[in-house]
Image (cartoon, helix red, strand yellow):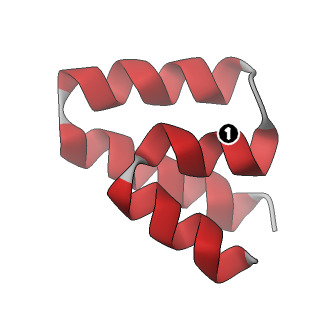
Amino acid sequence: MELIKIICAVILPPLGVFLQVGIGKHFWINILLTLLGYLPGIVHAIWVVAKNK
C-alpha cells in the first residue's frame, strides 16, 4: 500500500497526502503548494507519506 501512496504522491500530490492523513492541515498545505508549483507539492507529499509510515 505504501508504494501506491508514493506513486499517487508523484502523479497527484494531494491524493497521496489525502490517502495518508485525510483532510487536515497537511492536505490543504499540499493543495496550496501544488497550485504554486507542481514540484513543491510533490516534495511535500512524499515527505508526508514517508514521515507517517
10 to 17, vertically: above or below: below
Image coords of residue 49 (percent x, y): 65, 59
Write the residue at 61% across / 74% down.
Answer: 4
Residue type at mark 1?
Answer: Phe
Residue 33 pos. (x, y %): 34, 27
Q: How many marks?
A: 1
Q: Position of 52 compared to 50: left or right? A: right
Give the quadrant of the C terminus.
bottom right
**Depicted 24 relative to depicted 13: above or below:** above
Q: Quadrant of residue 2?
A: bottom right
Residue bearing mark 1: 18
Q: Left or right: where does residue 19 sit relative to residue 32?
A: right
What quarter of the picture does the N terminus occupy?
Answer: bottom right
**Is the residue 6 above or below the residue 37 in the image?**
below
Q: Which residue is painted at 57% across and 51% down in the image?
A: 16
The answer to which quarter of the image holds residue 18 is top right
Residue 32: x %, y % from top left: 38, 18
- Write the residue at 47% across / 30% down: 30
Q: Residue at the location (21% across, 41% down)?
A: 38
Tag 1 secondary structure: helix
Few, some or many C-alpha atoms within 10 Å of disc 1 (few <14, some 14-19, many ≥20)?
A: many
